[in-house]
Amino acid sequence: MDMDKTTRLLYLQAMGVETWKLKPQLATKNVVEKNLLTDDKPSKILTIEENWKELAQDIRVCQKCELYKTRKKTVFGSGNFNADWLFIGEASGENEDLQGLPFVGNAGLLLTEMMRALGLKRENVFITNLLKCRPPDNQDPKVNEITACYDYLKRQQALINPKIIIAVGKVAAQKLLKSTAPIKELRGVVHKIDNIPLVVIYHPAYLLRFLGKKRIAWQDLQLALKTYQLLQEE
């Protein structure tokens, strides 16, 4: 769902972005064949397309935790399977559960505009969550739920092989970085996981409630963009 121009400008102003324009399209990487191994499956050599299809099916029928009993749809993720940028949130909400897509509510619209301010489009990045099913009543993900689902995320990361990862919100940041530190201590720093730069940003749902964090959020996005640009120069 697209915003009209007036609403888009209001979102960007809330982020502290006074003027902006789209930047040139980011180049995509060449697709290569990979050998993806998982702990619970025998090794086999598949093409990228075959790996994605297998992973999507595994998630679609997953019953590793109790969330399968209450979900309407699994939320696999969306975007470019060959993206440089990987955005990871915590879990889907009601709208996502109904549509089977990540970040489609008001928070999703804001995340889209945050990307747009950096010259990114949703179709050119990949967006997913720690959990592929919605926790009832939007509860915080439980440890056993995250653990059960984490292999799916790592398989997605391995297939995409992104150049930069954006942890969207506290829960995603703490899990990915194996930390209990508050988000105010995790943001503003370039971390690394699996030798990939990771930048933490506030969850857009949080920003909609606390607009006082808008300029800090924009600073984090600029840090992510600068980090990516430096990688491009190497």
Image (spheres, rainbow, N blue to C red):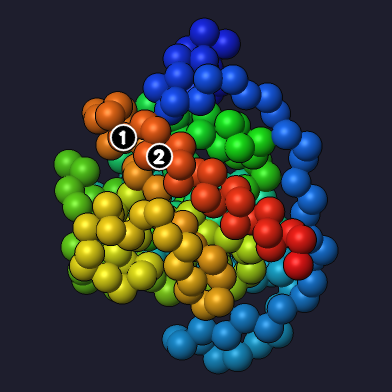
Instruction: Judge from the rendering whether residue 170 lies leftward or rightward of residue 20; answer left or right.
Output: left
User: As displayed, is residue 229 above or below residue 12?
Assistant: below
User: As displayed, is residue 119 above or below residue 7?
Assistant: below
Disc 2 residue crowd, few under 14, some 14–19, many 20+, Cα 10 Å = many
Q: Which residue is mark 1?
A: 213
Q: Amino acid at mark 2?
A: Ala
Q: Work out whether residue 134 or residue 70 is closer to the camera in this orientation and state it.
A: 134
Instruction: Judge from the rendering whether residue 163 lies leftward or rightward of residue 204; answer left or right.
Output: right
Q: Position of residue 128 (x, y in %)?
A: 47, 53
Furthest residue in direction right, as rendered: 30
Q: Which residue is mark 2?
A: 217
Quote the CA–CA distance across marks 1 and 2: 6 Å
- Residue pictured at 79% horizontal, 50% vertical: 27
- Residue pictured at 47% horizontal, 63% vertical: 190
The image quarter in which residue 188 lies = bottom left
- Residue pictured at 79% horizontal, 72% vertical: 32
Residue 55 seen: no
Q: Position of residue 143 (x, y in %)?
A: 21, 68
- Residue pictured at 73% horizontal, 34% vertical: 23
Cβ atoms under marks 1 and 2 closer than 8 Å: yes
